[in-house]
Each structure stands twice: as structure tokens, then as C-alpha cells.
Image (cartoon, rainbow, N blue to C red):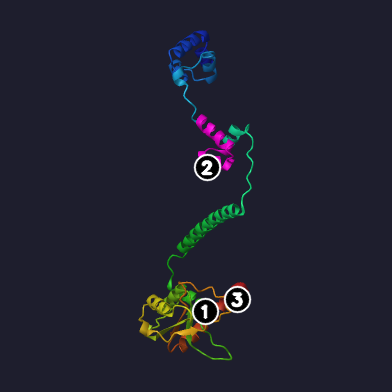
Amino acid sequence: MAHSQNKYADFEGLRERAVALRREGLSRRQIRDRLHVDNNDILNRLLEGEPPPEWTKRPNAKDDVRERARELRLQGWTYDQIQVELGCSKSSISLWVRDLPKPERRKRTREEASAIAKRGWEATLRLREEERQRTKQAATQEVAQMTDRELFLVGVGLYWAEGSKSKPYRRQERVTFVNSDPDMITLFLAWLRLLRVESARLKFAVHIHETADVAGAERFWTDHVGIERTALLKTTLKKHNPSTNRKNTDETYYGCLRVDVRGGADLYRRIEGWWSGMVVEAKRRTA
């Protein structure tokens, strides 16, 4: 503190030097550095009454933005529109135009309101889809590589959910899996391969509505499982019911693929046993 008092003790002499430098055209920063004055209050007192040189009177960049904002406001623009146009904050806009009359809000037509709502909904859907894809990608990474046991258990559950099952009133111990999802078919075939079921024992057939592109569906499924079309069993056609409001009518509809395992009675019995074992374990965990 004593050092600072000594530094500025000869205030009048220091002021004379500061005024002289100011009149030579130096800026406040240059004077501060030249006189080693690091206190803004002292510097203000030293330069009190001395106007800045012309070269330091740079135009304020916001002056032009402010004037443009006022022009747009007088034209009836909203704060949101001015913000998008000029890239400034709403708080600044409010200060600049608060003395101007508030523009009358024009009533939107039904078409305009509908278009605005549509744009807003499309933006919402886009954000939802982006979030959906981020979540899906993160979950995909969590699975990474399945072990044989994991694939084995997944396959048992998949078959018991989607495959054919023997009933007490109708004993049919056969392995048949039908699904419209190509990825489900892929997983089922990977499971059969894990169980060492020979590809020669597999038979395939397409199930599809008669009004669909049958030939296209047959090409799709044979390409998907890697067989010739001649290897397909006879396609099962579902008769068209005009009163049914079907949703699966676009070009990506390929019906279902049925996968049969020939001589699969023993495999079916093991699947029943595997599933029973999984249920026993589930009950133990929930007891």
C-alpha cells in the first residue's frame, strides 16, 4: 500500500504528463503503459476533462445492427424473426426497440397455421429419430460379440416364442419356424448351425398374400438364405379378403419364410427340455 501511495504521490506532476501524452494522440492503454498506471480510477482522474483523440473514436459495430433491428421492427417483424435475421440476442433487441410501437399481429390463415405446425412437428420427429438412432447404436455396442452359450439360450427362447409347438390335443414333434423379419430368420439359422443341423435337412417355403408380388418375394427370400429358387417348397398363398384393412402392402412386403428341419423330432424334444430348464431357473430366481 505504501508503495502505491508513493507511486502516485506527485499526482499533479503525473497528470501533467498524462495530459501531454493524451494531446500527443496516445490512447488510454498507451498512456497507462507509458506511465505504469495500473489503476483505472487513477487513470480516469489523470485524464479527466481530456477528450480522446479522433483516431480512437471507432464506430460501434452494434450501431448498424441496432438501426437495422429498428427498421425491421417498424416493418412488423417479431423478436424471433429479428434474432434469426441479425444473429443478436432478444434482450438486446428489446432494449433497442422498446420505444417503438408494438406491431399488430396478423391473424394467420388456416393454411399458414397448418404449415407452421407441420414444420414444428417435422422438427420434433427429426429430433426423436436422431435420439432413437443414438440409443440404438449405443445398445448395439453393448451386445458386442455373443458367446455360443448366449446364442444357444437366445435361440431356445426365440424358437419357443415363434416356432411351432406340439399340443396335448395334437402331437406334432417337428421343428418349424415362420417369420416375416429377415433378421429373425438369420438368427434362427445361426442357432441351427450352432446345433450342427446340416443344411441339407433345411427346407424353405414362402407364405404370402396372393395380391402381393409373389415372384419378388421368392427372389428376396432365396437371396437372403442363399439358396436357388428351385430349392423352395411350394409357396403358400393367402387369399385376399377385401374387408381386411392390411397395412403390409408396400414394395417392402415379402410375406413370411417358413423354415422346416427334416427329421426334427429329436431336436424338438430337446428344445422342449431346454425351455423347461430355463423356466425352472426363472422360477428359482423369482421364488
The residue that appears at 49% across and 20% down in the rendered structure is: 38
Magenta-highlighted residues = 62-90
Residue type at tag 3: Lys
Q: Earlier in the sequence, mark 2 or mark 3?
A: 2
Q: Residues within 10 Å of mark 3 (few under 14, many from 20)?
A: few
Residue pictured at 46% horizontal, 63% vertical: 140
Q: Amino acid at mark 1?
A: Glu
Along the viewing direction, whichever of 135 and 90 lies nearer the viewer: 90
Q: Position of residue 160 (x, y in %)?
A: 53, 80
Percent across and percent down for residue 26 are 44, 16
Foreground of the two, 198 or 107: 107
Of residues 100 and 187, the one drawn nearer to the viewer in this rendering: 100
Mark positioned earlier in the residue sequence (2 or 1): 2
Q: Which image quarter holds the N terminus?
A: top right
Q: Which mark is residue 84?
A: 2
140 within the magenta span: no
Mark 1 lies on residue: 162
The residue where tag 3 is placed is 283
Residue 149 visible from this viewpoint: no
Residue mark closest to the camera, 1 vs 3: 1
- How far from the left and from the top, in percent, is residue 198? 38, 83
Residue 257, labelled with which disc? none
Residue 48 in percent (x, y) is at 54, 14
Q: CA distance from mark 2 to mark 3?
A: 61 Å
Q: Secondary structure at mark 1?
A: helix
